[in-house]
């Protein structure tokens, strides 16, 4: 530690630069008292694993899902924010993950864990992420290019039409069962692009979102261009965009439950995703039924309903018979 600090010429007043770590793409500098450096550094490995590695390359778990592989990653520094563009692959195909990373929570965790002076140089801690299939990434890249040109026009003197909520331009991308909302806005801190993703095409589904300062749109577009050109070949299904899908439906049931029916399409065919949402807890579970099985599902439900209605009718007849017998006995008395 001392030699490392001397090499950088920062040893002074009994303090030195303890280390520079770039793990999980989090750059941090901490200062330690030389008298206690050995004791502190003995705990560094455990602290690093606890605080940094759970976030992974773009804010994911330390151990990726089984069978998931990272093929490439790019980091974008836009003003005070960091964004990661990762290309990943699993048994379902290739996809791109966009992550916005924030430093506040991680800064507090590191200060508490190390018990010494901490200066966070980079950004750590997950804030939000979006998932795009390769087809969705291409559509997103194309729309993003339009936003870049629109923003460049504003810089050249074009007068923007600003809505009441500060919105300058917006677009919606619909892909399979997901919707992506792009909205260029401005507030007192400047102009930014908000990108949100709704997993379900139903209007009440949850949203994930990132907020990109407008000057960073060009960086993101160029990064997507490079990654798509290199990794999308063989993973683009041109027919996906030509499939007309019906609007989503929903059914309100007892016990504050809602069932959503969203039709989607991918390289394996057309399917309906049936999601159960509990309004009180907000919990969600879903199944995907391929189109080839819809008729069988319908027949089974119809059969079950018919049998239950017959059972209910038998129960009602039995109940009426019992009541009639009781009434006759009462009249005899």
Image: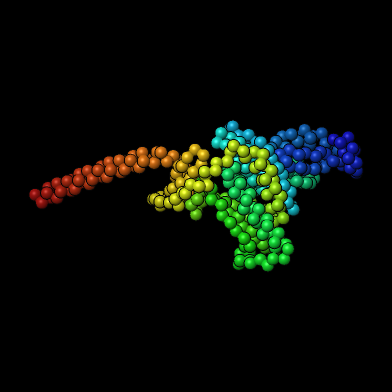
Image location of residue 331, percent across then percent down: 10, 51
Above or below, 246 relative to 47? below
Viewer-closest of 17 and 60:
60
Q: Is residue 71 visible?
A: yes
Image location of residue 56, percent across then percent down: 67, 39
Which residue is at a point 71% across and 39% down the rendered structure image?
A: 24
Viewer-closest of 12 and 206:
206
Q: Tell me, what colour scheme is on the image?
A: rainbow
Q: Quadrant of the N terminus?
A: top right
- Give residue 18's quadrant in the image: top right
Above or below, 61 relative to 280? above
Q: How many marks?
A: 0
Viewer-closest of 40 and 178:
178
Which residue is at a point 87% across and 38% down the rendered structure image?
A: 5
Q: Is residue 2 visible?
A: no
Q: Residue furthest left?
A: 332
Image location of residue 309, percent across then percent down: 27, 45
Q: Is residue 321 left or right of residue 112?
A: left
Q: Is residue 185 left or right of residue 265?
A: right
Viewer-closest of 285 and 118:
285
Q: Is residue 298 left or right of residue 50?
A: left
Image location of residue 230, percent across then percent down: 67, 39
- Give residue 72's quadrant in the image: top right
Which residue is at a point 64% across and 55% down the rendered structure image?
A: 146
Which residue is at a point 66% across and 36% down the rendered structure image?
A: 71
């Amino acid at each position: 530690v001392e030699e490392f600090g001397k090499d950088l010429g920062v040893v002074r007043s009994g303090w030195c630069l303890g280390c520079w770590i770039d793990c999980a793409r989090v750059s941090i500098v901490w200062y330690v008292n030389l008298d206690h450096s050995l004791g502190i550094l003995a705990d560094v490995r455990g602290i690093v694993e606890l605080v940094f590695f759970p976030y992974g390359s773009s804010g994911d778990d330390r151990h990726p899902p089984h069978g998931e592989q990272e093929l490439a990653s790019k980091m974008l520094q836009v003003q005070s924010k960091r964004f990661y563009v990762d290309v990943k692959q699993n048994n379902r195909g290739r996809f791109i993950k966009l992550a916005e990373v924030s430093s506040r929570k991680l800064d507090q965790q590191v200060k508490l864990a190390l018990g010494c002076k901490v200066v966070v140089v980079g950004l750590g801690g997950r804030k939000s992420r979006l998932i795009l299939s390769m087809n969705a990434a291409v559509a997103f890249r194309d729309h993003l290019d339009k936003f870049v040109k629109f923003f460049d026009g504003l810089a050249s003197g074009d007068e923007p039409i600003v809505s009441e909520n500060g919105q300058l331009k917006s677009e919606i991308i619909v892909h399979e069962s997901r919707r992506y909302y792009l909205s260029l806005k401005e507030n007192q801190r400047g102009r930014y692009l908000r990108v949100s993703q709704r997993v379900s095409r139903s209007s009440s589904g949850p949203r994930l979102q990132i907020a990109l300062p407008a000057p960073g749109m060009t960086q993101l577009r160029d990064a997507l261009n490079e990654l798509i050109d290199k990794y999308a070949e063989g993973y683009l299904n041109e027919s996906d965009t030509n499939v007309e899908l019906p609007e989503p439906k929903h059914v309100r049931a007892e016990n504050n439950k809602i069932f959503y029916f969203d039709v989607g399409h991918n390289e394996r065919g057309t399917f309906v995703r049936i999601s159960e949402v509990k309004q009180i807890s907000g919990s969600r579970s879903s199944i995907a039924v391929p189109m080839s099985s819809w008729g069988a599902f319908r027949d089974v439900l119809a059969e079950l309903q018919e049998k239950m209605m017959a059972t209910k009718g038998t129960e009602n007849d039995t109940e009426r018979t019992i009541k009639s017998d009781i009434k006759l006995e009462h009249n005899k008395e």
